[in-house]
Image: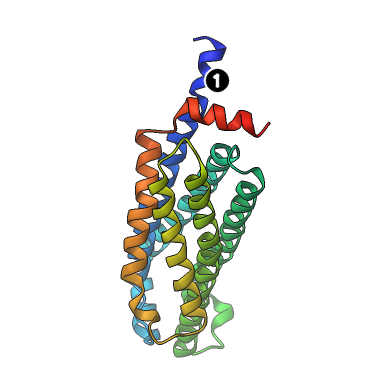
Amino acid sequence: MKTGESRERSPRFKARIAGLFWLMTMLLGGFAAFNGDTLVVSGDAATTANNILTHESLFRWAVVTNLVATICYLAATLLVYFLLKPVNRNLSLLAAFFSLAGCAVSGVSFILNLAPLAVLGGAPSLNAFSPEQLQALALIFLKLNSQTFNIAMTFFGLHVPSVGYLIFRSTFLPRILGVLVAITGVCYLTNGFANFLSLPFKGYLFPFVAASGLVGEGSLAIWLLMKGVNVQRWKEQASLGV
């Protein structure tokens, strides 16, 4: 294969790899969220602790799967930055920063998510605490993890609409994808601040947020994976930015 041909195909190849990583993020993140949340009973520390200890392997797998999902999102972020840089280099860089910040906050949430296992593990140093106190402490860690996750999703909520705007302004991807992705980001931000402010309707937002994520991010991931980008138009827009 000639070098020129390889370079010409590079944006489309990278777009498809970005789509693959983004799709893996959604699938793995969904698995982690579903399996992790099923073990937590809000307001019931004893039942939650019993669920975690009974299904410890599942709990650990949920944490590991979420970690892998975050790594996939990091890879997708870097590839999408490369793809959208010709549209607006500064905004594309800012979008990548939002994503990296969200991934960094997610790292803290992983620690908080593993903390209940340390608390409930029966270490001799914890004998000074009663079982009820340890169970309550484990539930507190999980609640802190939930709030940390909301902070991470707020950063992702800034990343996603930025990507949507760049897609809308691009000439090598369908504008409708940009609109759908931007709507998803707005839903993420709304959900995050509704939880921070403990607004009355916060409990009703999840179905809308999940649906917008499936439609917006799902459409983008599948399009990138199956179609990639219009290489000729990508090159033309890239040349205008030089």
Residue 233 spot, x, y in % from top left: 49, 29
Residue at image point 47% right, 47% down: 168
Q: Mark 1 points at which residue?
A: 7
- The location of residue 217, given as percent across then percent down, is 39, 52
**Quadrant of res 3:** top right
Q: Tell me which residue sits at (53%, 88%) in the image.
A: 129
**Which sits in the foreground, 22 or 142?**
22
Residue in the image at 37% along x and 58% along y: 213
Please state which amino acid type lies under the numbered disc 1. Arg
Q: Which of 56 and 41 is in front in this view?
A: 41
Q: Which of 191 and 60 is in front in this view?
A: 191
Counting from the top left corner in percent of width and height, residue 97 is at 63, 53
The outermost residue toward the top is 2
Name the residue rendered at 38%, 72% in the picture.
52
Element type where label 1 sits in the image: helix
Residue 55 seen in this snapshot: no
Viewed as shown, does residue 126 lie left or right of 168?
right
Mark 1 residue crowding within 10 angstroms, few (<14) / some (14–19) / many (20+): few
